[in-house]
Image (spheres, helix red, strand yellow):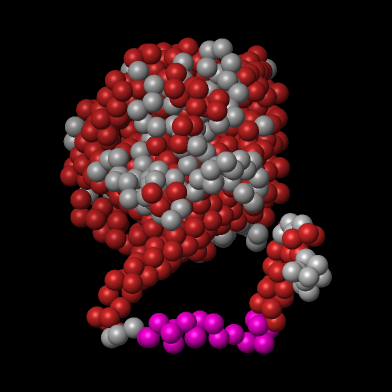
Amino acid sequence: MSNSDHDPSLTAEEASPPAGATAPASTGDQVEHIPLSARIQENDSDDEITEKLRLQGVRLRAGTIAPAVFWPSLIIVAAVAVLAITLPGPTGEVLTNIQGWITTNLGWFYMLAIGIFIVVALVICFSKFGRITLGRDGEKPEFGVLSWFAMLFAAGMGIGLVFYGVGEPLGYATTTPKPGWPGTETGADGVTSIIPGQEHAVAMLGMAQTFVHWGLHPWAIYAVIGLAVAYAIHRRGRPVSIRWALEPILGDRVKGWMGDIIDILAIFGTIFGIATSLGLGVQQIGAGLAAMGVVEAPDQWLLIVLIIVITLLATTSVVSGVGRGIKWLSNINLSMAAVLMISVLLLGPTLFLFQNLVQSFGVYLAEVLNMTFDVGAYTGEAGAAWGASWTIFYWGWWVSWAPFVGVFIARISRGRTVRQFIAGVLLVPTVVGIIWFSIMGGTGLWRQLFSDDPIVPEGADEFGVEAALFDVLGGLPLGGVLSVIAIFLIAIFFITSSDSGSLVVDMLASGGHPNPPIWSRVLFAMLEGALAIGLLLAGGLGALQAASIATALPFSLILLAMCFAIVKALKRDQDAIDARERRLRYQQISERLSEDFDDAFGEQVDHRIDYRLSRTTGFRERRREADADTLTAKQATATTPKADPEQQRGRFGRRRKE
């Protein structure tokens, strides 16, 4: 049996080479064997992890940073932040032009890529690869099912759900319906409006479109990158870094400049994604303060002050340590989110909300395929503009967040099978999102369509998405208390996102070290706040959306390559597992036949007959054996020393005949 049969820490694909053999270098077709001594374990100290990182080819310098990743990321992001703050007008114009070009020329690519991610995730889930364990063969999950679900639920919650929970479905049903929907019409000026009497039908489509944006589609992205990273770190003992997810196709090149570029792009995406979330969050906090009468109107200076305050709080959480910081705050924001959602359910139109959940889910199932691939080919500039503000923005935002969320869900999924991982990642956050939007968005729709106090005035061309939540809460009993809870919820969501995101960025900049230095985490947390200020000054929500779309484009190519890489790695692993199982079954059958042959089949064949049967061969076999005998005889003659001529003479002095 192979070494992998005895040592469950080895994956089936990488059984140890024979004694004295040299481990092959990693190439695109052959994955490098990682000795057990170089594999990162959960109980390793920081010094041991650093030494193992170097053994695996990670280039670390003083301060536990990878200079080829750390310095380019820091310099470029800092330069963008400084330019956006000092030159907000030109920066906003550049971002807007980039956004327009991408949505016009590559919007179809984003839509197709998301569809590919869904297909790849589902195919892997239901294939034979689903039995592979993300860890040692037979290893038990690190967390229980309920704890794991709770952490996936936490990953699925964020500022976006609070910001768009009411505003997105309400916007689709009033001022921003999607061009081309039944019940809508687009005028010569490119403005799409709802045909009178079709408000309810458009509202149902709006709920379904919201489910598309926040349900299965984004989490298919996270499932792909999370699975690839989890396989690399738990199954193969690689560092916590995005580059190793592409090792199956890049091989040893992930240790060089290619791997550096992959990690740099992952850092860009994470930082811009966090900055986008921070910008959205402070806009909504400002709207909430205005709705409560604390301020007259949220201006830019107020938003800048809010960013500075929240960034300082996030930095405090970073300094306090991940255990006391992230975990403590995560428990608080989950509890507050649950209180807010249940309060709206009970204090609002409860019966309608349950009906809305069921009916909207049915419309989602009927329309999901069409909405997945609707690139607006027949809606012209109006469709492209709508996509840039909604669907394409969302896909860019999710791709930007992919490194952060992927690393998070990968780290908490040790011991899960591939099938458990994908099913949990796709289902739990999707269900949470559908319930959240059905309650929060449904409350806004009910007030707009069935009450005497609509949120959006009739004939209005636009409304503030960030203020919609507080308009709904203000119309409920205990609305003031719920508004305060919502403001704290938004702030804590960003603090946890910044804390966790800074940790992921710092790990990537430190070569995958799970405990990077505090000083660099603080540095990246401050940089995220500065970037958010710059993007707000450069154009507010439009600049935030443009930044997400632009930074997501190169990383989406990496995600597509990751699909191929994880399928290749799982296939190699599964083939080796199948071969090992066949060897094990053959050995068991052989042992059973040797021990119990007489009991199972009667007396064995006479040994003389068995010998004759084994010696019976065909013409070619006999010819081959004869040639082998001749060659053996010649070799024996050549190696036999010649006898003394005197010893070869007979009694009468004659030479003996040989």
Locate residue 364 relative to residue 83 in the image: left or right: left
Q: Position of residue 265 (x, y in %)?
A: 61, 33
**Residue appearing at x 52%, y 27% in the figure:** 53
**Residue appearing at x 24%, y 56% in the figure:** 354
Comparing 477 with 33, the one in front is 33
**Residue appearing at x 61%, y 40% in the figure:** 22
**Residue appearing at x 35%, y 18% in the figure:** 321
Q: Is residue 322 above or below residue 640?
A: above
Most common secondary structure along the magenta stretch: helix
In which quadrant will I find the C terminus? bottom right
Comparing 25 with 627, the one in front is 627
**Residue interval drawn in magenta:** 605-622
The answer to whether one can see residue 430 in this image is: no
User: Splitting the image into 4 quarters, where does residue 487 fall?
Assistant: top left
Q: Is residue 394 magenta?
A: no
Q: Is residue 615 magenta?
A: yes
Q: Is residue 532 above or below residue 482?
A: above
Q: Position of residue 376 (x, y in %)?
A: 62, 57
Q: Position of residue 260 (x, y in %)?
A: 64, 30
